[in-house]
Amino acid sequence: MRKLFICVLLLAMSVPAAAAPAGDKGLFDKQVLHDRVLLLREHSPMENNIVAITSADGLIVIDTTGSPVTAQALRREIADHFKRKDFRYVINSHHHWDHSWGNQAFSDTTIIGHESCAGYMAAASRNMEQRMAMVQQRIALQQKRLKELPAGSNDPDLEKTIAFNQRNLAGWRTLELTPPDITFSERMCLRLSDLTIEMVYFGPAHSGSDILIYVPELELLVTGDLFIDRDYLPLFCGMDQVDVECWLTVLNAALSQKKAISHVVTGHKDLWTREKLSLWRDYIKDTWRQVRQAVTDGWTLQQAQERILLPDACAYLNQRGFSANRLARFQRDNILCFWRQLKPSAAKELGRCISSDGPEAAVAWFRELGGQQSRSHYIAEAELNQLGYALLGQSKHQAAIAVFTAAVAFFPQAWNLYDSLGEAYMRAGKREAAIRNYRKSLELNPDNINGRRMLEQLRQGS
């Protein structure tokens, strides 16, 4: 066996389980990207992409799906395609369950990933019983829908989804989390006999463990879930705290490689091109520049969200089926994500003030910020809502009411905040105030089903 050289580059249950479907055939679509690179796309609503590479030192697999059952089938498909069984390395593009919970099927190989993978994997598995119960209920509903189809008809997509959920449940019954054996913080390079595999931490983005994987000899770049544009929009703003400068450094390095990138493999759905990745690198660069300039010029978050628009180069997303409203919300969310890196969170500071000084003093401070026109902090409706519910979870009803009341004063058209305030009053036993706020929520959004249901319950309790 040839020696592997590792170099760190200097650039930086009680739930009943359904049986697994019999047989492996038909679980993956296969596409040969190179005589040494096989792409397998799982038959599932998520369409996970898995990459297999053959080398003189053994087989390399990038990502392992979300279930050991599916991963065992994956392993057999790869071995059958390449006519060999010497699996040498598995690389996790990030820690999320649908990319790493199949690691168990490759426990005899060396698994590689970012140093934060193990901790994140453990945290995600703590609610396993609830997760399994939820999927079991989902399967029951889906099977009911299947039985209700007219005689002689079928629904292949629904059947595929049921099979996917059954495979997950079957694998989770005996799941043994298998985190990476070898980890790195910034960069790592595997120098095999005939290939070089470069891995680089992208920085906090979609998750806290995203890496890019580049194989120059095969002109291959694997990006995990950072860049997707069918059914999902690019997912690089999934964390509260991100590192945009790190993203740009990593993307610039990837796009400036001497060997051209012929294949950009995303974590799900369609492959990308180098040109599309370059487009989104430019989007990040330009949006980040505009947000920083907005802060320098004294704009508020609201002004930035109104004035910094999705560029024309991203208009192709309309043809991908995304509505104008969805794209506008995507842009607002990205601007908020970037803004968070430059301004402190008013909601987080409010929570700290409630703990130290009490709700009355904290809300008084919050009101002095100037609402959406604040230039010292960013004020996000969703974060205020989360803070209020965190307080409700601690049975601090009056503090939650104070937060929601202050929030609706700053976001008077936010029907969801009125719904939350109604719930806080209801839990505090203040029926009339609860009814008043649920009514206001329904006035702003007549389609608020939860508000209508809660209002009916409150009325029946009179």
Image (cartoon, rainbow, N blue to C red):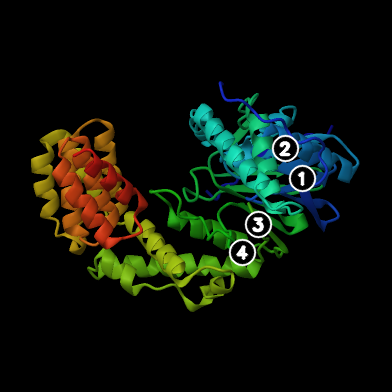
Q: Which of the marked residues, 4 or 2, is nearer the chain's N terminus?
A: 2
Residue at 58 percent across and 63 percent down: it is 229
- Binning the other alpha carbons within 10 Å of mark 1 as few (below 14), some (14 to 19) or many (20 upward) gives many
Identify the mark at residue 143; answer none if there is no mark. Answer: none
Q: Nearer the viewer, residue 261 or 73?
A: 73
Q: Which of the marked residues, 2 or 3, is nearer the chain's N terminus?
A: 2
Residue at 66 percent across and 49 percent down: it is 158
The span from disc 1 to disc 4 (Cα, nearest Å) is: 33 Å
The span from disc 3 to disc 4 (Cα, nearest Å) is: 22 Å
Mark 1 is on which residue type? Leu
Q: Is residue 11 above or below residue 98?
A: below
Residue wearing tag 2: 70
| Residue 102 locus on image (x, y percent) | 67, 35
Identify the mark at residue 255; answer none if there is no mark. Answer: 4
**Quadrant hosting residue 175:** top right
Q: Residue furthest top?
A: 14
Residue wearing tag 1: 27
Q: Which of the marked residues, 1 or 4, is nearer the chain's N terminus?
A: 1
Residue 295 visible in the snapshot: yes
Q: Which of the marked residues, 3 or 4, is nearer the chain's N terminus?
A: 4
Mark 2 is on which residue type? Thr
| Residue 257 locus on image (x, y percent) | 65, 62
Q: Residue furthest right?
A: 83
Marks 3/4 in contact by CB < 8 Å: the verdict is no
Identify the mark at residue 269; answer none if there is no mark. Answer: 3
Determine whether the residue tagged by mark 4 lies in a helix, strand or loop.
helix
Residue at 14 percent across and 45 percent down: it is 432
Marks 2/1 in contact by CB < 8 Å: the verdict is yes
Q: Is residue 111 above or below residue 332?
A: above
Residue at 23 percent across and 30 percent down: it is 395
The span from disc 2 to disc 1 (Cα, nearest Å) is: 8 Å
Q: Is residue 253 above or below residue 201?
A: below
